[in-house]
Amino acid sequence: MHNLRYGFRMLAKSPGFTAVAVLTLALGIGANTTVFSVVNAVLLKVLPYPHAERLMAIVENEKVTGDVSVSWPDFIDWQKQNEVFQCRKWVSASLSVLRPVTSFAW
């Protein structure tokens, strides 16, 4: 208890240092909370779909540009030739950090 009172007295003697220390702690805690919230929402939470473990994202890969969106005619051809997957939906998402370029729900 004595050390706690001594610490508060020292902080009261130097208000500039106290303000910087409190601001630094507040920014650190806020940044940590933000990063955890994003990681939790994007990576850790289960998707709100039944049988989410069965969802797949399919993209075409080109040598020059890498992964690209699958065109609608290609999707229709794949769907007609499909003997393995049960296709439910075609979604062409916009480029985003948090979403795949193209995703399918099979």
Image (cartoon, rainbow, N blue to C red):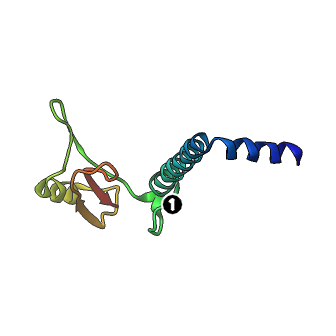
Give me the residue at 56% from left, 42% from top: 16
Q: Position of residue 18 (x, y in %)?
A: 61, 44
Q: Position of residue 51 (x, y in %)?
A: 48, 65
Q: Is residue 53 above or below residue 89?
A: above
Query: Foreground: 76 or 83?
Result: 76
Query: Foreground: 18 or 56?
Result: 18
Which of the 4 image quadrants contains residue 104?
bottom left
Farthest-out residue, front = 13
Give me the residue at 44% from left, 68% from top: 49
Farthest-out residue, left = 73
Which of the 4 image quadrants contains residue 81?
bottom left
Give me the residue at 46% from left, 68% from top: 48
Badge 1 density bin: few <14, some 14–19, many ≥20, Cα 10 Å: few
Lateral position of residue 72 relative to residue 49, left or right: left
Farthest-out residue, top = 63
Callout 1: SS: loop
Residue topped by disc 1? 46
Q: Position of residue 67 (x, y in %)?
A: 23, 40
Lateral position of residue 16 relative to residue 9, left or right: left
Quarter of the image that includes the C terminus: bottom left
Q: Amino acid at mark 1?
A: Val
Query: Foreground: 96 or 36?
Result: 36
Give me the residue at 81% from left, 43% from top: 6
Query: Foreground: 25 or 61?
Result: 25
Tally of marks: 1
Lateral position of residue 44 relative to residue 49, left or right: right
Q: Position of residue 20 (x, y in %)?
A: 55, 42
